Amino acid sequence: MNASFLLFSLLNTSFVLLVSPFFMSLIKKVKAYAQGRKGPRLLQSYFDLRKLMQKEVVYSPNSSWIMRITPYLNLAVLLLATLFVPIVFIPEASGGVGNIIVFLYLLAIERFFTALCGLDAGSTFGGMGSSRLMSLSAVVEPTMIIAFAALAYVLKTVNFHEMFAITAGSTIPESPTLTLISISLFIIIIVETGRLPVDNPATHLELTMINEAMILEQSGKNLALIELAHAVKQTILMAVLINILAPWGLATELTFTGLVVSCLYFLVKASLLAGLIGLFESSLAKMRLFRLPGFYMMAFFFSALTILMEVFT
Amino acid sequence: MFLLEAFVYGAVIALIFGTVLPFLYRNKKARKASFGLSLISSILLLVFAGIVLYTGKEPAFQAFRFLPGLDFTLAADRLSAGFILLIVAVVPGVSIYSIEYVEHAKSEAGKDLQTALTNLFILSMLMVVLAGNMVGFLVFWEIMSLSSLLLVLHDYSSEENKKAGFFYFVMTSLSTAFLFLGFISLFRLTGSAEFGQLDYPTNVLTLPFLCLFIGFGIKAGIVPFHKWLPYAHPAAPSSISALMSGVMLKVAIYGFLRFLLSVSAPELWWGILVLIAGSLSAVLGVIYALKESDIKRLLAYSSIENIGIILIGIGLYLIFKVEGLESLSLLSLLGACFHAFNHALFKSLLFLCSGSVVHATGTRNIEAFGGLVKRMPHTAALFLIGSVSIAALPPTNGFVSELLLFQAYFYSSALPDPLLKVLLITTLSVFALTSALAAALFVKLFGITFLALPRTKCAKEATEVSKLMLLGEAVPAALCILSGLFSSRLLILLGFDLGIPDMLPLGLILVGASGLVWLAVNNSGTSKSPRISKETWGCGILAQHPTMEYTSAGFSEPLVVIFKKIYRTEISSTRVYADTKESIFKSGTARIHLIKFFEEHLYLPAACAVSGISSQVSKMQNGKLDTYVLYVFIAVLTLMIFTRYFA
């Protein structure tokens, strides 16, 4: 761990923490426009988080220490995961940081503990959410692994930092097959962040929800931490897609102008992607739970197709 | 060299004393001493295995002679030292745990027997791994099978356990029969009973390979020979389940690896066969486990899954070796071995914890549990460590071994054959599915068992188990975390620099980041808010009731629906109507039948065929000596003619 990596850790993490709530509001805004409403302010998520931070935490007497540690653990896991996805600049590869399999399983930690939290308070909704989350994430797992394996096949490395260094080094996408992987990655963002048609983030109706059901018993600053962790997850997943498909402007070494350019470019690109996600959500209805495996198959198909094209050419 | 032998002899003598002692004195003190001896033996073996693994020395020594020409030799190399390390990792926890646990057995004699057999069982597994030739291997293999059979039958009064014991006995005999066949055909080939390098064309090795694969496969519990596991484990005491699942299955893996590593040029289809069998075992094991609500049976199915993962590693090793990709084959082989080691740790931890839970509540049905985290907080914490490891979450050891296998898969683009790549992609997605289903399984197991409100009276009245039992569980739990954190350092120490991510900094960052987040949230001026306690929201019902909670069956329902083709549930119903237009329902019956595919379509026909043949054969027995002499005479004559003209 050298000084440059330390600086990277600080900058990358704080940048992600800072901008993540913005994209949450932005997607809400886009959805509101699509529905003909005005929507919340672009800074509304920040206000919400501040308000939640000041509220008291309500614990159910049935709940245990699982409920108490999960919010902290989840945010910590995602902060660790941000080190895997360089946004401000690409540091020299250091140890295991950047390994895509570790990255995927860091997301699994967050899922595992959130699902336990859902069962902790003994509420019916929480159990339902956990059950659905774990089932659907199990079904989507092959898709995610194959998509990342396809990345590894095309770019010949299993490290995000090296991958991004390759994509950022070339002006056009390294391989046309990367475009195909991007479709899978987009679907993975939708699934992992619990958006339509998989889950509806805007509802508290028991029939439609997954993620919201699990965090129903969370309150106050714990809820704020969980919401923030969710926002961070969305940002880093978007960053993966952006750095693979459109890595323009990503600095490969540490300079001041490089940093500023990287950040600005990322803000523009991520805003566009967030807008796209908002439009995508607005154009679809919630799918029936048991039709979702079919939706995942689509993503699976695109990533498997990528690998097959790589294999046979 | 002499010193090294002394460690082994010391351990063996300690274990023999441990076996005899409970019978000599027949009191609690002797049982305690007996487990103390197994603890001492594992420390001696730890030193031995450590030295062999680190220095790469290969000590071989003659122990005794059965018959002229049939020496029983002991030998150790790095492979066997690795598996001794695996035994040593499990035994201390089980020994400490058993000191108290064995006292819960019904009768005095039962306690003594269980103590003695546990030591014998450990000894036999150790000797199988140390055996230098096939004779010793088979002799101790049988002792291992029989001592574990007696332990499975410890509570022989119940009908269910009798059936389990019988099932286990049949399967394990079948396994030994195949091993005999395999070893005899190897013996015919090489003319010696030693395990040596096999430089033969692979077509003559096909028969030994298939026999040994089936023989070891039955013992390791790969699909479709897996059915004895979910029967035997619930019947056996939990400490024995921990040993059986943690170590005995791995001894079978050891035997299989011992054979495969001695073959200089394996064939591609071997690797493909092992890979496919492994993938099938892995995914079917976890899918069956999801539907299970008996805690020990669930863990047994999960063992089938993990054996599948180990076989995936072995299959990949063979494929990469045939294709000449040395570094990838080493990566997969280490992944398989490390997963065997890790599974020994976390599965023994989980079985020991489940033993505590079963002891505290008096039932194995997880639908009856709930809320145990408040009543058994330490067991819950240890169980969580086991669940996190088996669900392969970083930075625990379970993750590292799966990481090795995933890395091997991800680099497989180096394979020249496109069709092989397609096979690998397919099995990779199955492997990913398995891993994610295992996470779902252990969220269910931990959540339903320990969280929310207790569902029954027995769960409500459960109390924490004794400190000694907790200590026994804490040993593998600590090893799970340590072997995860120090995994890459340990592998480098042993001379395998694979360039895998170092878990230690990741773990430290994770702990540090959690601490930072906690400090940031709780020390800022805005968060001086009180914590209050309010009832869980129950849609207007004020008092929370356990019937409102999710159940085990409810939790796995979505997956059961998604995988309904695999479960093959048959729902039949008959209805009687009160009117002719069939609109007023009067009475009816409905039945849900879970088709046990392997039992009904594989085991039952085989068993029927065998009993059919034996009933035919039994007609030849009339109990008269002269008839039997005639049979012997005919047999000898036939043999003589056969050897003269055909052989």
Image (spheres, coloured by chain):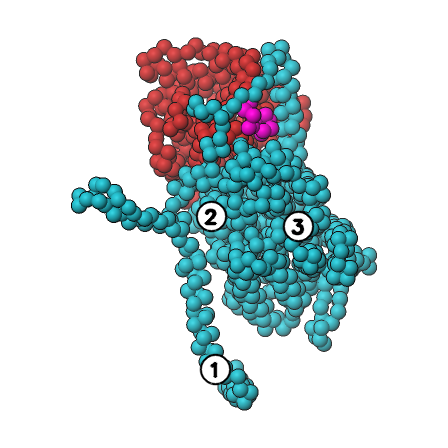
Chain colours: A red, B cyan
On whether residue B151 falls in the magenta region, the answer is no
Mark 3, residue position: B104
Does residue A47 lie above or below B70 as drawn? above
Where is residue B329 drawn, in percent x and y?
A: 57, 50
Where is residue B626 drawn, in percent x and y?
A: 54, 89
Mark 1, residue position: B620
Instruction: Tell us which disc is closer to us: 2 or 1.
Output: 1
Residue that sits furthest to the left in the current view: B580
Does residue A287 lie above or below B335 as drawn? above
Q: Residue at x 32, y 13 (%)?
A: A36
Q: Quadrant of the N terminus of chain B?
A: bottom right
On whether residue A64 falls in the magenta region, the answer is yes
Residue that sits furthest to the right in the current view: B2
Q: Residue A119 vs residue B338: left or right?
A: left
Q: Residue at x 41, y 48 (%)?
A: B567
Q: Chain of mark 1?
A: B
Q: Residues within 10 Å of mark 2 (few under 14, many from 20)?
A: some
Identify the magenta region.
Answer: A59-69
Where is residue A244 drawn, in percent x and y?
A: 47, 28
Does residue A98 lie above or below B490 as drawn? above
Query: Which amino acid type is marked by label 3?
Result: His
Query: Which amino acid type is marked by label 2?
Result: Tyr
